[in-house]
Amino acid sequence: MDWLAVAPPTLTAVTALVVLVADLFVPDRRKPLLGGAAIAGLLAALITLVPLRGDDRSTFCLTTDAGACSYTADRFTLVIQLLVLGGALLTALISLHESRKLPAGEYWFLLLASAAGAALLPASRDLATLVVALEVASLPAFALVGLRRGDRRSSEAALKFFLSSVTATAVTLLGVSFVYATTGTLHLGRIAGRLGEVPGPLTTLAAVGVVLTLIGFAFKMAAAPFHFWVPDTYVGAPLPIAAYLSVVSKAVGFSGLILVAVVAFPSYGDVWGPVLAVLAALTMTVGNAGALRQSATRARSAVRLLAWSSVAQAGYLLVPIAAAAYGTGAGAGGLGGERIGSTVAYALMYAVVNLGAFAVAALVARTKPLNRLSDYRGLYARRPLAALALGFFLLCLAGLPPGIVGLFAKVTVFSTAVDAGLGWLAVVMAVNVVIALYYYLRWTAVLFQPAEEGVAPSPATPVPTTTPTPAPAPTPASITTPTPIPVTIAIALTAVAGLALSGAPQLVLRFANTSLF
């Protein structure tokens, strides 16, 4: 048992249990301490990644085959765990103020439990552990979405999320059973070796198992046509949980997809490669079309736009995974292993700037609970630093300077499609990037427009000069409230990280040039 290798998810899970038990004894006025304990646990889990940067470490291995292990801490695992735990930490910072409106003990326990499952998934090297990690990450998320008691919209979002996810899980388990029936093993490395030797009568069953297994992870990534739960779920969930789902749930989906497709099913690349390429094109197109339809005056249109944007971003993340099926050396150890590095690099960029955008949205929602796009008009006049930060995040998502890291990440993903011979997919991506510029730039422009004041009196209606005019009441645009320190820290951390990555994009883009397995 290698305790250091399993330390990141283990520490997170232990902290979740400690918080749950402590909630029974902590008085109401001390409940904020539970949030501090959750943040401390996530920081400790992140610190344990540092000594794991050396050689790959594996544990829970078969006694009959030391090379068949259920848990491996390699470069891929560590990068995804950094993304997941870092995303959970930023979510916790955004949540410190919001959690006062929710049952504190349950909230922090569910968030940490979900983060523990998400941290376990990239290290999983057999299908059983993979499915268990997927469900540990997902089940608490259902409860988090519906944790606002008495809120009908929240309950409906949680129910839709739950029912659709359970269906996807059932399909995935059916696929796993088909794969096990045709190969006789659950370990990913062994499956890769045996799928190429499946007897002729079982090849169709194996191919169906491969496709069904991929469906569950495509659902977690919010890939079309499995994206229908995203807008209503994000709007109905507490805003920090929407931020969590947009990053951590997506990381769970694409890391699981990489493990089963590139590591376990490389011999069936001719099956899943075209499927994922079509899913990538469909997902980015549907996501951008949904974002374009958002009205500036619709309630919660800002969150809906970010929800549809996350669907489109999932399409970009799928491109390198699909490209991994094409070309010589495709697979975990060859060209495919290098191409998926582009997905990881893009995901790191996306996680930083998207969490930053949600942090600013959480700040605006304190005075504008409807969180409409029109509520961001004149944000620069009220909160200049927040407006500048949000503008920077949106430009990164659009791939425009000064968001250099967003531009380079998109170019890297685009290059993988071209190198794999998927010219049609590269064209679809280029068109969608141009389409996305419209709604990202429209939102950015709103930030710096003058705030709308009260309606001026009609020129046809004379105003008596003898009657003293009372001082005008302050308009909603002029009302500001103190910024919660944890939200300020979250915005500052993401802004600094985004600026650092734009100044030195090689910090994440280097993953695109090396094999992570």
Image (cartoon, helix red, strand yellow):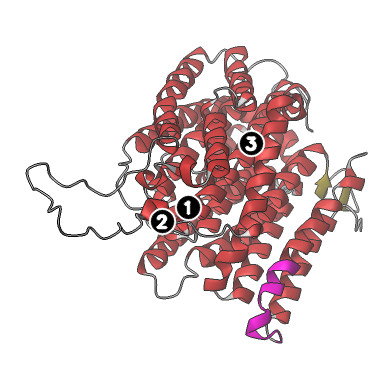
Say which residue label 1 marks: 364
Compare residues 205 and 389 and report the one nearer the observer.
389
Most distant residue in the front direction: 466
- Residue 305 placement, left or right of 314: left
- Estimate the spatial distance between the alpha carbons at disc 2 and disc 1, rounded to whole Å: 6 Å
Identity, as a three-letter code, of the amino acid under mark 1:
Val
Identity, as a three-letter code, of the amino acid under mark 3:
Ala
Residue 454 painted magenta: no
The location of residue 387, given as percent across then percent down, is 52, 40
Say which residue label 3 marks: 347
Which residue is at 36% across, 57% downward? 474
**Which is closer to the viewer, label 1 or label 3?**
1
Residue 28 painted magenta: yes
- Estimate the spatial distance between the alpha carbons at disc 1 and disc 3, rounded to whole Å: 25 Å
- Above or below: residue 294 compared with residue 463: above
Say which residue label 2 marks: 368
**Magenta span dominant secondary structure:** helix
For the record, the magenta segment spans: 25-37
- Residue 410 placement, left or right of 472: right
- Estimate the spatial distance between the alpha carbons at disc 2 and disc 3, rounded to whole Å: 30 Å
- Above or below: residue 289 compared with residue 88: above
Compare residues 103 and 323 and report the one nearer the observer.
103
Is residue 77 visible in the rendered structure shown here? yes
- Above or below: residue 476 compared with residue 413: below
